[in-house]
Amino acid sequence: MDLRQLRYFVKVAEERHFGRAAQALHIAQPALTRQVRQLEDELGVQLFERHARGATPTSDAELLLERASFLLRYADQMRHDMVARQRHPQGTIAIGMSPGVALVLTAPLAAAVRERFPAVRLQIVELWADTLYSQLLQGRLDVGVMVGSSALPKLTTAELLTEQLCLIGPAGHPKLKGRQLRPQDLQGLPLILTGVAKGGVRGIVEAATSRADITLDGVIEVQSLEVAKRLVAEGFGLTVHFAAPIQPDLQAKALRAVPIQGLTQSRFLARASERPPSTAAGAIWSTLKDVVADLVKSGRWPNATLSRELKR
């Protein structure tokens, strides 16, 4: 088994068709088929169910795909690192974060990376917290921006910030006139709940209101803040989230965000501790901390307090 065979296997698994894979790899289909069969013989498993429409990966292939994808990424990292010793960090760095954080971080991070490390290509992957953790451990992500407690096994972490969640609604809504709200003030409000149950922002809201013996009137459940914001604008209710992604709406006074006492969430950087970071991943790790610190200090990440490390 060699890296070439693994690359061929991964491409067939992605295309689910030997012909299309051969075309993408610029090799003859019989040669590709022969290499995959040799890999199957060496491993003693069948990797694909061949049929008229193409080739479907078996359960053994799904397992191998996870391992092979990491191994090929790591091999690419080694090559880039050896080149980087003589030049600058380069290669593709996959960064996982929630959709809300992506709205805040992607543009300033991309600008900083373009200025500092023009040979590094960013891949922004929008995922929820539980999926972020598993993908970091599997090697599918180089770095993750996560929420909650950083005391997770097999991760190297760095604290970023703590922020207050806000009740968000139309600027003229009577519930949004004050400077701060209590969890009890959510009682009876028509709420558009974002995210997944017991996770992320929604998990924090549900836990706080449960402790205060408050029943939430969740009129609609959605995945993203962007959809929630559209529903708020259409008059379906209010939502609870952090305010940074809606800065343009706040500045235009289309929406107002009022912090809720005791509803906070912490964010941290994470990477798999069992996998040494590439030169480029280390550079992006430092750049992410710089970008977050700048966003908070400049007021572009409102209602947030930097970690002790980033305050220095």
Image (cartoon, rainbow, N blue to C red):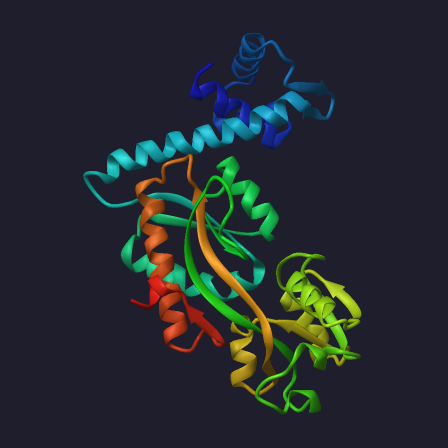
| Residue 149 locus on image (x, y percent) | 52, 55
Residue 56 seen from this side: yes
| Residue 60 locus on image (x, y percent) | 64, 21
Residue at image coords 67%, 76% = 183
Residue 142 seen from this side: no
| Residue 83 locus on image (x, y percent) | 25, 36
Q: Which image quadrant for residue 252?
A: bottom right
In the picture shown, does residue 276 fall above or below 197? Answer: above
In the picture shown, does residue 16 fall above or below 211? Answer: above
Which quadrant does the C terminus fall into? bottom left
Q: Residue furthest left?
A: 86
- Quick check: 102 left or right of 222? left
In the picture shown, does residue 32 fall above or below 101? Answer: above
Q: Which image quadrant for residue 173?
A: bottom right
Foreground residue among 211 and 131:
211
- Quick check: 175 left or right of 140? right
